[in-house]
Image (cartoon, helix red, strand yellow):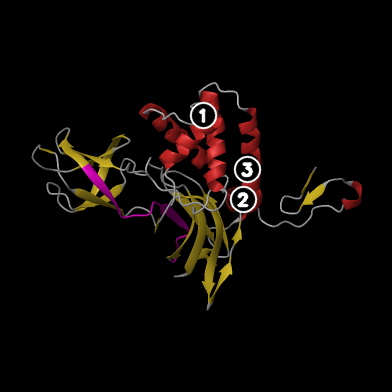
Amino acid sequence: MAKTARELVIDSLRTCGAISSVETPNANEIFHGLGELNGLIEQLDLESLWPYTQSRVSFQTVAGKNRYTMGYELPITLDVSRIESTTENIVRILTSPTPHGYVTNSRIYLRGCSNVADGFYTIKAVPQDTAIEIDYTTDLFDEDPSDAVVAIEDDTADIVKHRANRLISCAVLDGDSFRPMKEITVNEYYSHCSTGATGMPSTYSYESTYPYSEVVLTPVPDGSHTVELRYSFKIAELSLDAELSLPSGYYGTLQYQLATLLADHYAVDAPGVREEARKRLARIKRLNSPNKKKARNDFSRRRGYYDGLTDSWGN
């Protein structure tokens, strides 16, 4: 049976010695641990060490357009805790979970709310982490719904999917098969690429802007071409009772990595835990490292063992 984030936090607190093996942490300690866990996962995700955070998406190019924005995977359904008017023509919708990625002046589609008609609306403000405000002409009202939900769809991004941390690969359909495209840096694009050349895209660059990133294709597409992207993306934050379905070795790595963070917060001296955390993280890095050719032929001059995955020597 899969363990939950709550159990992982408790195991980490016990591992670092912040609590004994028979103690149960209080609510504040658990919530603090959950925050540290989500922060830890963000860092692993940025280093492409977190599993299940890669996906792929296909889209059609448009003639004369070489920039394509990439947004969040929608629609999503948000539980409505309260709908209230703040000022004239402004409606605030408090939601759970947090509506990540929405910013002022972007457009959303609302449906399924009794006091707000279905349709597209412009976001006027995102005043707090769990609320969005829309421009809506109506009489002032307050509603505390019992079971209402609001489905939010985005019509802003060209590629309606996750906002990628990075692109892993990009390919264009050429006949019956996809042809890999060459990645270039943003500087190379601005320095060498002609915005007047048209044809089937052969190179791409990725601008990791926020809240929508941009995929830039060259040459400028001369028509409709199917382009497939493979990318990594930021996962949603874990809740306390979220089940952790992880590959072998990941739970223990998270447990010890989180334990080292919590040890600092609780002023616990745990050198053994830190060393074990380092070893476990090194195994995960080796597991996720691409195969490499050996950079140099120095077998006769080195002692110890050679790790072909990382092109390094160990004792």
Q: Name the residue under label 1.
A: 262
Near-viewer residue (159 or 264):
264
Residue 122: where, in percent of width, then height?
A: 25, 45
Query: Does the rendering let one see residue 191?
Result: yes
From the image, state whether disc 1 or disc 2 is nearer to you: 1
* Amino acid on which the number 2 mark rests in the picture: Ser
Query: Does the rendering let one see residue 44?
Result: no
Quadrant containing the C terminus in the rendered view: top right
Quote the CA–CA distance across marks 1 and 2. Answer: 47 Å
Residue 280 numbered tag: 3
* Badge 3 or badge 1: first in the primary sequence: 1
| Residue found at the far left of this picture | 139
Q: Name the residue under label 2.
A: 191
- Range covered by the magenta-colored residues: 63-80
Residue 311: where, in percent of width, then height?
A: 76, 50
Relative to 291, is 251 on the left or the right? Answer: left
